[in-house]
Image (cartoon, helix red, strand yellow):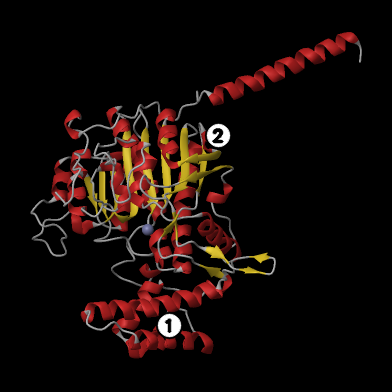
Amino acid sequence: MGSLRRRVFTAIAIVLVFSINCVAYAESNHLEKAKGVILMIGDGMGINQVKSAGAYAQRILGKDLAINTIATSGLTTTHAANSKVTDSAAAATALYSGHKTNTGQLNILPDGRQAFNVAVAAKRAGLSVGVVSTTRLTDATPAAIYSSSARRDCEAYIAGQLPEFSPDVVLGGGGAYFIPSSQKGSKRTDQKDIIELMKAKGYGFVENGSDLKALNPETVDKLFGLLSKSNMAYILDRQGSKSLSDQPSLADMTKIALSIVGKNPKGFFIMIEGGRIDHACHTHDLKTMIVETIDFDAAVGVALNYQKAHPDVLVIVTADHETGGLTPQIEGTEFSIDPVPLQTIRRSLAYIEHKIKTNPEQQDAILKSAGLKLTEEEAELLRNSQTKAAKDKPSGNGDRAKRKFAKSATLDALSIITSKRAKVEWTTFGHTEQPVMTKAVGPGEKLFSGSYDNTDIAKKIAELLNLSLPSPALETDQTSVEPKATGAAPCP
Ligand SMILES: [Zn+2]
């Protein structure tokens, strides 16, 4: 190489190295900002839950999960302040506010102070806020957006905080907590009519999928939807049911919610939860878990399409914790989940169990119509566990305890049968401390690679949205826009 060419080459190399350093410098200083953040949470969706749903999607449906198309991914620790194994309340508090708290507590820290989250900061800065879930809106993951309570189970009290906070879009289940006690099916003890309070604040109100689809997002700025009295039904159990088939998919809810919050020129923060993945895992119901995860994944697909059209928006997909300790069986060197035997199952195990409980003599027909025709060996397993439960029934604990005991015998046997067919095992009926997978697409996505804690997610979101998270404080220090702290049991 001649000396001139060598000097030109060296100069180019220096410029190249310098510009790569500049990019690295910009990234390390988090100079990228997002106009909107879509935080998507699969409740209880551990790595093996995604793996199982991915195997089902690929082998049975012939497609990939949208989640698996996201390149940037990291591992997130989930422990609570008082326990290695978290619950949704402590996890949601961490994910939105950046503070660890005890299990069962929503935005109330172990020392009694109230934590303020990115939704509060976003509201203060004039951004739109949305909350969308397939569970009751008063359940921990959605509730931690707009309320604070020392006890997550004070759901009527939590519901009462919704009009105070007023997220711009609120879609989910749990209608029973929002209607006065005089109305049928109410779970309130007072006459508060929260639907009326929300309507008086200018909210459009929807109760089913048809209403939601008919809505013109251009003409609606505030939307409140109660799509079920309790949790929204499992996708599997909606089929063929007159009362349940008009519950919208999470994807449809996501589409409408994004088109409303996305109108705010100042930006938005929205949380979208696939909340029933966790419930299916608690009962070791693999097929239902997979279908719920695929429903959640379709909503992730909607968010990713939205992000493509709005590159200044960041999509984050994570989980609050893993549920069930789901693990593939290992046969020799094979580490595999076999989704094929699950294909025919058309109902959740909880639905099948409920049907059998009400019509025990119809058991075979119920199983057959649910697509779960048992082999002789499986039928024997079910029979044995039911007989054993009947024989071992606890004495002196009353009918309720007996029923509960018998109920879990059928459900347990069905979950063992279906899990065995698909070659998976479960290690607990509760949550585990396994780290969860976090994925991200959009401005600042690189902040979400590597290993970090769930509290870091709130901090990263705040930074990317240019928000400062208010310091935790006792309720008297705060203005009326935030929910009030309770700091004490019993329910206020
Ligand atoms: Zn759970």
Where is residue 60, by image quadrant? bottom right
Q: Label 2 belongs to which residue?
A: 446
Asked if disc 2 is less than 8 Å from ligand 1, the answer is no
Determine the CA span between mark 2 and mark 1: 48 Å
User: Furthest residue to the top?
Assistant: 4
Q: Seen in the image, is 60 located left or right of residue 10? A: left
Q: Is residue 229 above or below residue 142?
A: below
Q: Label 1 belongs to which residue?
A: 367
- Which one is in front, 243 or 219? 243
Give the percent coordinates (x, y) of residue 435. Answer: 50, 49
Give the percent coordinates (x, y) of residue 443. Answer: 50, 31
Where is residue 407, by image quadrant? bottom left
Amino acid type at image mark 2:
Lys
Q: Tag 1's secondary structure?
A: helix
Quadrant of ligand 1: it is bottom left
Residue at image coords 13%, 65%: 184
- Which one is in front, 436 or 21? 436
User: Dot 2, crowdedness within 10 Å: few (<14), some or many (≥20)?
Assistant: some
Amino acid type at image mark 1:
Leu
The answer to whether one can see residue 49 in this image is yes
Q: Tag 2's secondary structure?
A: helix
Q: Is residue 378 above or below residue 27?
A: below
The answer to whether one can see residue 262 in this image is no
Q: Is residue 71 above or below residue 323?
A: above
